[in-house]
Image (cartoon, grey):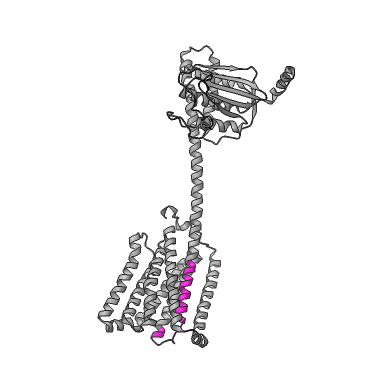
C-alpha cells in the first residue's frame, strides 16, 4: 500500500471559485435539509406508523446503519492510507466505534431493553469518544502513527466497558447520570458542532469531504431528536430516529465513496506518471550505456595514435592526422549528450571512412589490412558507418587478440558490401542471430553486449544490414558482412558495366 501512496494535495478536490462554491454548498444544504424533513415527516405519518411495525423496521434499519458505518470506516481508512490524510483516519476510527458500539448500544437502550442503565452508560461513553474523534478530524495531529490512530478506538472500547461495568455495580447512580438532560443535550450538540465544523473544513477541500460532515450533522441531529423525545420535550420519534440516522450515515458513506474514487484515480494517474518516468529513465540509461560503449571503442582506436604522432615514426602524417581528426569529431558528437539528430542520407566515398579506421587501429599494433575496390560510393551517413566498423573491429581485438583482421569492400549489384574477418575462435553454432540482441555476450566476455546491437540499429536507420556468417572449417574465425545502399551517382556506371558484360 505504501508504494501506491499519494499526497493529499495530488487528489483532485473539485475546487471551484468561492462564489460558486458557496452557491453549491447552499444548494446541497437545502437538499439535505429537505430530505431530512421529508424522512421525519413520512416516518411520523399515521398510515406509515400503522402499516410498518416500528420495532422490526427499526432493527432492520439499525443493522443497515451499522453496515454502512462499517463500510464507511473501511473507505475512510483506505483514503487516509492513500493520501496520508489524518482527518480521514480519525473519521474512520469514529465510524468503526459507532458501528461496533454506538449503533448496538442505542438499539438496545431504545428497543430491546429500554431504561437499561448498562446500555445507556455504554452508549453515552461511546458517543463521547466519537465526538472527540470527530473533533480530532477537524484539527488533526501533525503526526499519527498506526498505534496512535487506533488508540481512539481502543480508548472508546475501554471507556465503554468501564462505563458498563460501573453501571452494573451501581445502576441507580449510573442511571441518574446517563439520564441527566444537560448531559444528553451536551453530547448531541457536541456531535452537531463537530459535524458543522467538519462540513466547513471539508467543503474548503472539496465537496465529498463536506458531504461527510453533512452526514455527521444529520446523524447527530437524529440522536439529539431522540434525546428530546426521551426527555418528553418531543413526541415519540417512532421510525424517525432510525430513518434519519440511516440517512445521515448513508450521506457520510456517499462522501467517502466519492473520496475513495478520487483517491484511486489519483493513485492510478500517479502510477502512470511513475511508469512513464521509469520508461524515460530506462531509455536514458540505455542511451548512456551505448554512448559509454562507443566512447570506449573510439578511445581504444585513438590510443596508439598519440604515441605515433609524438615519436614522428609514421610515414604518412597527413593520413594519420586526418583519421584522428575524424574520430575526435565523432567522439565529440557522442559527448554532447544530446539525442542524435535525424540522419540525412548523403552520397559519400567509402574508402576514406574505412582507411581512417584501419590507420587508427594499425597504430595500436593490430595486423589489419584494407582491400577496397576503387571509386566505391555508398548512400547513408558516413559517421554511422565509421561507428559500426569501429564496433566490429573492437570486437575482433577483444575476442580474437593477436589475430589478423581483414577489411574488404566491394560492389554487389546495387549494394556495397563490407566484410570484416578475423581468424580467432569464432562463434558457437547457431548463435549468428542471437549476438545482435541487446546485452548478449560470450560466457568469458568482459564486454557489455551492446556493440553489435548498436551497429544493427544504426544500419537499420540508414537502409543497411549487418549479419554474421557461420564458422566453417574452410573459413575459421568470425566474419561480419555489412551491406549498404549504393550511391545514386554510381548506379549508371553499374548499369553500363552489366550491359557490357551481357
Q: Quadrant of the N terminus?
A: bottom left
The residue drawn where x is 41% and y is 54% is 2
Residue 90 or residue 112, whichever sits in front: 112
- Residue 109 in the image: x percent, y percent? 36, 81
Does the stretch in magenta take in 250? yes
Task: Please identify the quarter of the rendering in which residue 388 is found.
Answer: top right
The residue drawn where x is 51% and y is 73% is 29
Residue 202 or residue 362, whichever sits in front: 362
- Residue 44 in the image: x percent, y percent? 49, 85
Establish if 337 lies above or below 301.
below
Q: How many marks?
A: 0
The residue drawn where x is 48% and y is 63% is 259
Task: Please identify the quarter of the rendering in which residue 467 is found.
Answer: top right
- Residue 268 in the image: x percent, y percent? 50, 54
Q: Which residues are magenta?
A: 228-255
Extreme residue toward the left, this view: 169
Amino acid at each position: 500500500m505504501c508504494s501506491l501512496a499519494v499526497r493529499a494535495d495530488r487528489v483532485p478536490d473539485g475546487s471551484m471559485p468561492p462564489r460558486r462554491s458557496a452557491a453549491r454548498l447552499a444548494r446541497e444544504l437545502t437538499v439535505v435539509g429537505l430530505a431530512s424533513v421529508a424522512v421525519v415527516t413520512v416516518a411520523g405519518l399515521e398510515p406509515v406508523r400503522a402499516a410498518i411495525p416500528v420495532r422490526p423496521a427499526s432493527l432492520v434499519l439499525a443493522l443497515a446503519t451499522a453496515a454502512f458505518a462499517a463500510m464507511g470506516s473501511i473507505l475512510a481508512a483506505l483514503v487516509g492510507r492513500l493520501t496520508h490524510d489524518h482527518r480521514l483516519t480519525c473519521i474512520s476510527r469514529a465510524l468503526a466505534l459507532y458501528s461496533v458500539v454506538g449503533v448496538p448500544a442505542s438499539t438496545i437502550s431504545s428497543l430491546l431493553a429500554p431504561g437499561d442503565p448498562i446500555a445507556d452508560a455504554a452508549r453515552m461513553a461511546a458517543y463521547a469518544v466519537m465526538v472527540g474523534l470527530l473533533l480530532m478530524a477537524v484539527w488533526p495531529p501533525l503526526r499519527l502513527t498506526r498505534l496512535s490512530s487506533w488508540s481512539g478506538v481502543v480508548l472508546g472500547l475501554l471507556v465503554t466497558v468501564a462505563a458498563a461495568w460501573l453501571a452494573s455495580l451501581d445502576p441507580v447512580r449510573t442511571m441518574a447520570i446517563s439520564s441527566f438532560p444537560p448531559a444528553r443535550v451536551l453530547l448531541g450538540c457536541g456531535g452537531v458542532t463537530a459535524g458543522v465544523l467538519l462540513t466547513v473544513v471539508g467543503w474548503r477541500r472539496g465537496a465529498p469531504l463536506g458531504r461527510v460532515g453533512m452526514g455527521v450533522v444529520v446523524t447527530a441531529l437524529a440522536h439529539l431528536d431522540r434525546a428530546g423525545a426521551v426527555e418528553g420535550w418531543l413526541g415519540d420519534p417512532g421510525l424517525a430516529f432510525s430513518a434519519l440516522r440511516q440517512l445521515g450515515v448513508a450521506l457520510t458513506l456517499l462522501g467517502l465513496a466519492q473520496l475513495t474514487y478520487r483517491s484511486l484515480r489519483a493513485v492510478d494517474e500517479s502510477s502512470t506518471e511513475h511508469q512513464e518516468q521509469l520508461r524515460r529513465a530506462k531509455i536514458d540509461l540505455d542511451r548512456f550505456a551505448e554512448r559509454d560503449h562507443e566512447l570506449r571503442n573510439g578511445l581504444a582506436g585513438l590510443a596508439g595514435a598519440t604515441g605515433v604522432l609524438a615519436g614522428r615514426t609514421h610515414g604518412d602524417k597527413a593520413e594519420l592526422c586526418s583519421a584522428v581528426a575524424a574520430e575526435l569529431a565523432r567522439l565529440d558528437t557522442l559527448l554532447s549528450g544530446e539525442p542524435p539528430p535525424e540522419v540525412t542520407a548523403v552520397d559519400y566515398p567509402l574508402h576514406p571512412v574505412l582507411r581512417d579506421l584501419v590507420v587508427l587501429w594499425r597504430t595500436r599494433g593490430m595486423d589489419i589490412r584494407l582491400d577496397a575496390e576503387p571509386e566505391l560510393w555508398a548512400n547513408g551517413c558516413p559517421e554511422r558507418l565509421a561507428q559500426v566498423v569501429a564496433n566490429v573491429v573492437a570486437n575482433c581485438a577483444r575476442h580474437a587478440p593477436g589475430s589478423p583482421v581483414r577489411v574488404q569492400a566491394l560492389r554487389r549489384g546495387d549494394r556495397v558490401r563490407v566484410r570484416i574477418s578475423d581468424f580467432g575462435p569464432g562463434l558457437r553454432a547457431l548463435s549468428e542471430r542471437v549476438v545482435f540482441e541487446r546485452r548478449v555476450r560470450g560466457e568469458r566476455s568482459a564486454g557489455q553486449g551492446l556493440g553489435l546491437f548498436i551497429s544493427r540499429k544504426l544500419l537499420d536507420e540508414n537502409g543497411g544490414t549487418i549479419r554474421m556468417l557461420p564458422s566453417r572449417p574452410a573459413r575459421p574465425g568470425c566474419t561480419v558482412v555489412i551491406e549498404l545502399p549504393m550511391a545514386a551517382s554510381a548506379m549508371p556506371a553499374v548499369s553500363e558495366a552489366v550491359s557490357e558484360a551481357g
